[in-house]
């Protein structure tokens, strides 16, 4: 639960749809802060103390902040914020006539009510530092006019626009570029950054005073959305330049007064995205080919084993095939998933199925199950760990259930700095005094070598109890676990 939701529920007694309404405002109020050069504070009524509590705060990118400290959770009396208290009580926009000097600088405050289901549930306080005021430029006048219009839309419940948020990574911001258009799509004002973006798209000549239909590459969609009073986010590309645009219709009583279009050039970001996609596709293709090559080697070994008369040699080749297949499983998983991390539980399930099908039969049925989760592992950890798990499973089936069935449990215990793997069976168990270093067979020796040399961990094998059963435990501490 976010701090906004926690405070609003506990202190202001707001719930469900009311919280959704506040979250919608907070997700899109950066635009209002930037256009008005103001800090924004979201106030709700604190029913515990009969006071006002700050439940959210945002600073502008276009001006210095008034508040260096975080005010979320601050409780103030109605006397300290009379404009906010009045706006909450009367549900109207309240503008202070005289500046407030309590923060050490003159601050002009405007309280904007937020209504839900016919009642005011919160107030957005727009707070601008008057000491920074100077003769405004045309850009600043356009910003402030747009801020006043958005504030009125906020009070009327017409902003933020449903279904559109400005808090995603690539969303254009006010400083990236702003175009003000009238209801017919004619440009009233374009900021220097916006004009530069259109220049890179190949638009020549003046932009202000022209209709979007004369120069925009996707004017029909914008004009249609503007006429319907609907927000629109679109992307255009020309001459190797990619520009993202976000249209915000300016409305009053559901009548369209014009629109704001935020413009951001995202050429380099899109180029990097394409390079990453190409890299991911290349890596997946490499893993796919490695998997195919390993499967080919395994097939060749199977063909070779069928031509051999020696049962011992055939068994040795079969064990090699299982080891190669274990490595191939990891590469197959990597070829299907993006990135260089493996959901190892999926690999473990596949290994369990492979060993069950290859080594058990009806005369000695062995049930296997998985407990816990290993989570995602890097390829450098997943490959040797898959071999370790395969060897431990094979060893449990072959030596624990030579003449009867039973159960094998694979247990994962993922911790902050380590991963513990245990393979527990209820078979005959190792002999008393058995030592993993001196008495281990080839499979266990391979597993121990991989755990110690590749994963930096330890492997221990012990008898479970007096009536048999074996537990093999691999402890993989840092640095192997740090890559998890």
Image (cartoon, grey):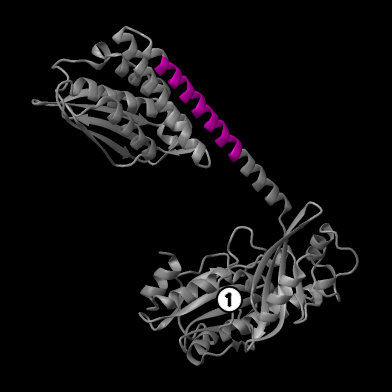
Bin the neighbour count of mark 1 within 10 Å (Cα to Cα): few under 14, some 14-19, many 20 and up.
many
Q: Classify mark 1: helix, strand or loop.
A: loop
The number of callouts visible is: 1
- Between residue 208 and residue 457, name the one nearer to us: 208
Establish if 240 lies above or below 234.
above
Image side of residue 204 versus residue 142, left or right: right
Q: Residue at x 30, y 18 (%)?
A: 444
Locate residue 193: give its quadrant: bottom right
Given residues 383 and 24, the one toward you in this image is 383
**Up-down: is 283 above or below 293?**
below
Q: Quadrant of the C terminus?
A: top left
Position of 71 with respect to 437 (left or right) is right
Q: Residue at x 39, y 41 (%)?
A: 375
Asked if residue 455 can be seen in this view, the reply is no
Q: Main secondary structure of the magenta part?
A: helix
Residue at image position (47%, 20%) is 297
The correct choice, above or below, for 19 with respect to 473 in the image is: below
Residue 451 lies, with reference to residue 170, above or below; the image says: above
| Left/right of residue 448 with respect to residue 277 in the rendered view | left
Is residue 93 visible in the rendered image? The answer is yes
Q: How far across and how far down the image is residue 283, in percent? A: 57, 35
Quarter of the image where the N terminus is located: bottom left
Residue 247, horizontal then vertical, whole percent = 68, 71
Give the x, y percent position of residue 120. 48, 86
User: Is 301 colored magenta in this rendering?
Assistant: yes
Indicate yes or no whether the magenta region holds residue 196.
Answer: no
Q: Which residues are magenta?
A: 280-303
The residue indicated by pointer 1 is 160
Q: Residue furthest bottom?
A: 90
Q: Position of residue 223 (x, y in %)?
A: 74, 75
Residue at the right extreme, as displayed:
205
Q: Residue at x 76, y 75 (%)?
A: 180
């Amino acid at each position: 639960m976010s701090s906004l939701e926690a405070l609003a529920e506990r202190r202001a007694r707001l719930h469900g749809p009311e919280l959704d309404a506040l979250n919608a405002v907070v997700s899109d109020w950066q635009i209002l802060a930037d256009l008005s050069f103001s800090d924004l504070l979201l106030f709700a009524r604190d029913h515990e103390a009969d006071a006002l509590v700050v439940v959210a705060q945002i600073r502008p990118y276009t001006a210095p902040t008034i508040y260096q400290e975080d005010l979320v959770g601050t409780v103030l009396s109605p006397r300290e914020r009379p404009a906010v208290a009045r706006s909450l009580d009367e549900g109207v926009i309240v503008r202070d006539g005289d500046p407030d000097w309590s923060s050490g600088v003159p601050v002009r405050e405007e309280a904007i009510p937020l209504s839900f289901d016919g009642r005011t549930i919160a107030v957005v306080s727009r707070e601008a530092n008057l000491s920074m005021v100077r003769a405004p430029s045309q850009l600043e006048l356009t910003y402030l006019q747009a801020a006043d219009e958005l504030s009125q839309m906020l009070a009327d419940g017409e902003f933020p626009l449903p279904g559109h948020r400005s808090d995603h990574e690539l969303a254009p911001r006010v400083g990236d570029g702003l175009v003000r258009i009238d209801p017919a799509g004619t440009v009233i004002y374009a900021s220097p950054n916006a004009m530069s973006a259109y220049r890179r798209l190949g638009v020549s000549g003046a932009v202000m005073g022209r209709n979007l239909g004369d120069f925009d590459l996707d004017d029909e969609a914008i004009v249609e959305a503007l006429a319907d009073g609907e927000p629109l986010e679109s992307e255009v590309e020309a001459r190797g330049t990619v520009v993202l645009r976000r249209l915000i219709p300016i409305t009053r009583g559901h009548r369209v007064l014009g629109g704001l279009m935020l413009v951001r050039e995202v050429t380099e970001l899109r180029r990097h995205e394409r390079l990453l996609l190409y890299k991911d596709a290349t890596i997946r293709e490499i893993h796919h080919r490695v998997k195919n090559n390993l499967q080919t080697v395994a097939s060749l070994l199977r063909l070779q084993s069928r031509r051999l008369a020696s049962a011992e040699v055939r068994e040795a080749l079969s064990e090699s095939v299982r080891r190669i297949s274990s490595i191939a499983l990891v590469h197959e998983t990597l070829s299907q998933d993006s990135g260089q991390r493996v959901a190892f539980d999926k690999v473990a399930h596949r290994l369990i199925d492979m060993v069950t099908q290859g080594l058990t039969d009806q005369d000695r049925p062995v049930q296997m199950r998985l407990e816990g989760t290993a989570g995602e592992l890097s390829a450098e950890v997943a490959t040797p760990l898959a071999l370790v798990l395969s060897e431990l499973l094979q060893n449990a089936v072959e030596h624990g259930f030579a003449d009867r069935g039973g159960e094998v449990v694979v247990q994962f215990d993922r911790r902050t700095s380590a991963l513990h793997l245990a393979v527990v069976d209820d078979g005959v168990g190792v002999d008393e005094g058995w030592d993993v270093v001196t008495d281990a067979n080839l499979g266990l020796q391979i597993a121990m070598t991989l755990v110690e040399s590749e994963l930096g961990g330890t492997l221990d094998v012990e008898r479970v109890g007096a009536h048999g059963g074996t537990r093999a435990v691999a402890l993989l501490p840092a640095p192997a676990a740090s890559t998890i």
